[in-house]
């Protein structure tokens, strides 16, 4: 600062100073320095604010900074100056100074003002300032006096309600805009919370009433009525209010949204509670957020135990064997880390009481709008029952696998047995010879001894074997049949004892032998005399020790099998000829049973024939045929070298050839019995009859047929059909023999061969 300026200021009368932007005094008059405190007097620079009252300090600072900024001078600004104990009223002036060197400073002067001029100036200044403050407020503000009349209103109050200050100042404010409730009913002033503040001196807050605008619209408002106190007396009140229409709309929207959220929440809760699977939620830190009823029931953890706590440490902390299960390895938490769905079908969750539950679960991440994982939902179900079933299944699987090969063979075996099963479903006959055989069966069936069934081919040895098995205590187990004559020599061991895969060329899979199939039951060795001598010793060992080794396997298998053998050979003669082992013969023939041939049980031929005819007719779906007495005599007169099997074939052929209801019996391929019962019925007999005898036989045959048909010549069941000739041929022969239809037998005597 130039010395001349500083000298001018120092010697100037009155309160004069030069200050910089920070209000530091660069030069001051003697009078101004005299106002300063003892410790600051005369020392430059010092702060100008040291001689300005705190109430005026901000105004002075603002004025100086305004001069620096705009260059416009400040004139007659009312302030208080002096010392803390002797503040004086004055006017503040400030103008811009610029030195030759370009430095910018501000000159200030404080002059003493007349008391009346200052008060008026200060009043207007404060009023304008306060009005500016009031108008800057976003809320509406009213003032009332002790009588309830309005004293002022800010701009927001005017904008909100439309009432201008001139319309309301001096009027009872309640009557202007608070006279009625929202429904239009009167609102008494004595009930008004605004006036209550004037009466009781308390602050009253209301958050849901209406103020009425100048155009009659009810504006929802919230307001506060605060009493004005002067010297302990209530002189009025200040009412601050705001328009809450937007808030109410937001609240209604929020309430609606909240109601919708609650409805959705309730639906989701109902769904979660109804779910049979356990469901719980995790936040991004792996702490529980919710759990449904099934989860609580399955694991026993209460909802309070789960929410806000690490779920892994509660029920997934260890593997099934008790070894630790680190959280970082847990698929449940992996969903929170990688944002992917993780499914596990065989782990355990730990219950509240320390037990384990085998579970399968799915952990699904909860994703934010940006796709970041923000938690997870875990759905799990108790699979303990299923695992128990699976364990039982696995335990049974080995047994099933062992039996599988056996079942495969039994399948093939049963397919063969369809054709080899009992031909007649039961043993037919009442002859003494058959009764004797059945008595032997009854005697030996209940014992475990081996049985040797002897008899010609076709007599029914297999039926006797089945009868022995059915009457034994092994009837619940299988009867396995082996036709020893049909087994190739090279496959004998495999057929009887089984083999493993690769035991020999062509052994592409394991095979269970017939001996093992018959475990617990009966092994029927049909045609046992056909077993090769070289293999009889192996069979004997099994019969003696009840154990064997499959071909190609070193395992020894123990079996419990009863042996029933059958043969049409004379095994004693075979033993003597060296074609059958004697020790095996004695092993098999502990109890021999002989089945008689059909020619020695002629009483059974007709019942067997009838049974066969009925069975074949049923199979072919045709009406059952009858066997005449003459056909019965013919059947009984045959030798039946093939026994029951031959009889069955003859009857099946007769059913196929028959037309109508009469059996067409054809015995052309059978051998007649050379015994006395054959008589003249044999076609090979050399005996003959005369012409008259032959014609008498023919006439008698016609009459017998007519009697059987009740003297009907034609039609179904007529004599022509029975004789298998045309009705016209029968009519011609009846005329030739003088047979009169419908006449008594005495008019058609047998033996009359008239022409």
Image: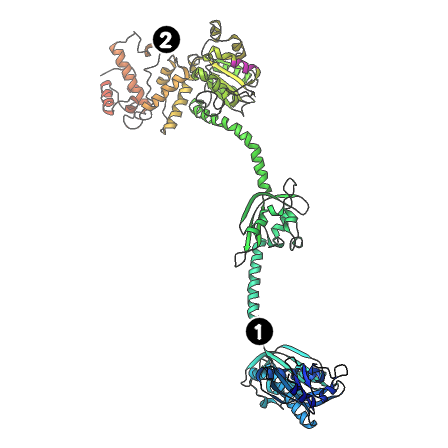
Location of residue 689 in the rendering, given as x and y in whole percent from the top left corner: 27, 9
Q: Secondary structure at mark 1?
A: helix
Q: Is residue 554 visible?
A: yes
Q: Quadrant of the N terminus?
A: bottom right
The disc, 2 or 1, on the residue closer to the chain's N-terminal end is: 1
Mark 1 residue crowding within 10 angstroms, few (<14) / some (14–19) / many (20+):
few
Q: Nearer the viewer, residue 627 or 666?
A: 666
Query: Is 190 drawn above or below residue 407 in the view shown?
Result: below
Q: Position of residue 416 (x, y in %)?
A: 43, 23
Q: Is residue 153 visible?
A: no
In the image, residue 529 lies in the stretch drawn in magenta? no
The image shows residue 261 at horizontal and vertical percentages of 56, 63
Look at the magenta stretch and give its main secondary structure. helix
- Which quarter of the image is occupied by the C terminus? top left
Q: Going by the picture, which residue comes out furthest to the top?
A: 576
How far is disc 2 from disc 1 in space, using C-alphas? 128 Å
Q: Which residue corresponds to the image point at 31% horizontal and 26% vertical from the top-left?
A: 660
Secondary structure of the residue carrying tag 2 is loop
Q: Which residue is mark 1?
A: 247
Q: Which residues are magenta?
A: 538-544
Please identify the quarter of the rendering in which residue 417 is found. top left
Which residue, as the protein is rendered here, is positioned at the far front?
Answer: 3
Query: Total marks drawn?
Result: 2
Which residue matches tag 2? Answer: 674
Q: Is residue 582 left or right of residue 84?
A: left
> Height in image: 66 above or below 561?
below
Label number found at residue 669: none
Expressed as whole percent of the image width and height from the top left, the position of residue 686 reads 29, 7
């Amino acid at each position: 600062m130039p010395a001349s300026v500083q000298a001018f200021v120092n010697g100037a009368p009155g309160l004069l100073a030069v200050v910089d932007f920070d209000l530091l005094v660069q030069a001051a008059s003697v009078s101004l320095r005299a106002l300063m405190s003892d410790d600051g007097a005369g020392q430059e620079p010092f702060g100008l604010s040291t001689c300005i009252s705190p109430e005026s300090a901000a105004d002075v600072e603002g004025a100086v900074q305004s001069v620096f900024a705009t260059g416009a001078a400040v004139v007659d600004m009312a302030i208080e100056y002096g010392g803390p104990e002797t503040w004086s009223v004055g006017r503040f002036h400030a103008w811009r100074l610029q030195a030759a060197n370009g430095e910018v400073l501000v000159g200030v002067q404080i002059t003493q003002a007349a008391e009346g001029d200052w008060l008026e100036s200060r009043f207007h200044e404060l009023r304008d300032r306060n009005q500016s403050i009031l108008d800057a407020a976003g809320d509406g503000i009213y003032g009332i006096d002790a009588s309830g009349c309005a004293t002022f209103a800010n701009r927001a109050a005017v904008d909100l309600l439309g009432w201008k200050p001139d319309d309301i100042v001096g009027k009872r404010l309640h009557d202007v805009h608070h006279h009625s409730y929202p429904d239009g009913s009167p609102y008494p002033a004595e009930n008004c919370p605004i006036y209550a503040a004037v009466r009781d001196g308390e602050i009253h807050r209301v958050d849901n009433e209406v103020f009425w605008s100048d155009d009659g619209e009810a504006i929802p408002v919230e307001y506060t009525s605060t009493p004005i106190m002067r010297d302990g007396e209530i002189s009025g009140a200040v009412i601050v209010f705001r328009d809450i229409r937007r808030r109410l709309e937001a609240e209604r929207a929020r309430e609606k949204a909240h109601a919708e959220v609650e409805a959705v929440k309730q639906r989701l809760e109902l769904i979660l509670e109804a779910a049979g699977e356990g469901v719980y939620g995790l936040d991004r830190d792996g702490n529980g957020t919710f759990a449904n009823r099934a989860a609580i029931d399955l694991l026993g953890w209460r909802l309070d135990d789960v929410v806000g706590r690490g779920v892994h440490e509660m029920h997934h902390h260890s593997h099934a064997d008790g070894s630790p299960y680190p959280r970082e390895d847990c698929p449940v938490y992996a969903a929170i880390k990688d944002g992917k769905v993780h499914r596990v079908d065989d782990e355990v969750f730990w219950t509240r009481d320390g037990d384990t539950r085998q579970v399968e679960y799915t952990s699904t991440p909860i994703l934010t709008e940006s796709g970041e994982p923000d938690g997870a939902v875990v759905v799990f179900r108790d699979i303990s029952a299923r695992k128990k079933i699976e364990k039982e299944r696995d335990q049974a699987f080995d047994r099933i696998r062992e039996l599988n090969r056996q079942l495969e063979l039994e399948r093939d075996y049963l397919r063969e047995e369809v054709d080899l099963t009992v031909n007649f479903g039961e043993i037919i006959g009442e002859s003494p010879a058959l009764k004797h055989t059945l008595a032997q069966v009854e005697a030996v069936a209940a014992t475990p001894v081996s049985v040797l069934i002897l008899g010609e081919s076709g007599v029914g040895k297999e039926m006797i074997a089945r009868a022995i098995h059915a009457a034994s205590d092994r009837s619940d187990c299988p009867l396995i049949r082996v036709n020893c004559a049909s087994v190739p020599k090279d496959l004998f061991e495999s057929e009887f004892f089984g083999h493993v895969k690769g035991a020999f060329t062509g052994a592409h899979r394991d095979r269970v032998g017939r001996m093992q199939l018959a475990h617990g039951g009966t092994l029927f060795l049909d045609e046992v005399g056909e077993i090769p001598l070289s293999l009889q010793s192996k069979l004997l060992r099994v019969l003696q020790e009840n154990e064997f080794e499959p071909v190609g396997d070193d395992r020894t298998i123990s079996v419990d099998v009863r042996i029933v053998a059958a043969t049409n050979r004379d095994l004693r003669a075979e033993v003597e000829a060296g074609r059958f082992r004697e020790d095996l013969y004695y092993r098999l023939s502990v109890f021999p049973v002989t089945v008689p041939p059909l020619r020695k049980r002629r009483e059974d031929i007709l019942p067997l024939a009838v049974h066969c005819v009925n069975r074949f007719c049923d199979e072919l779906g045709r009406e059952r045929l009858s066997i005449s007495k003459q056909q019965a005599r013919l059947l009984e007169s045959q030798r039946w070298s093939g026994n029951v099997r031959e009889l069955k074939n003859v009857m099946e052929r007769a059913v196929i050839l028959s037309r109508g209801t009469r059996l067409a019996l054809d015995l052309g391929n059978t051998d007649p019995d050379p015994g006395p019962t054959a008589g003249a019925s044999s076609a090979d007999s050399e005996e003959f009859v005369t012409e008259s005898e032959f014609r008498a036989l023919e006439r008698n045959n016609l009459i017998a047929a007519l009697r059987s048909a009740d003297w009907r010549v034609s039609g179904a069941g007529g004599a022509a059909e029975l004789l298998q000739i045309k009705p016209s041929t029968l009519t011609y022969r009846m005329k030739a023999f003088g047979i009169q239809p419908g006449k008594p037998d005495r008019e058609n005597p047998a033996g009359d061969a008239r022409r």
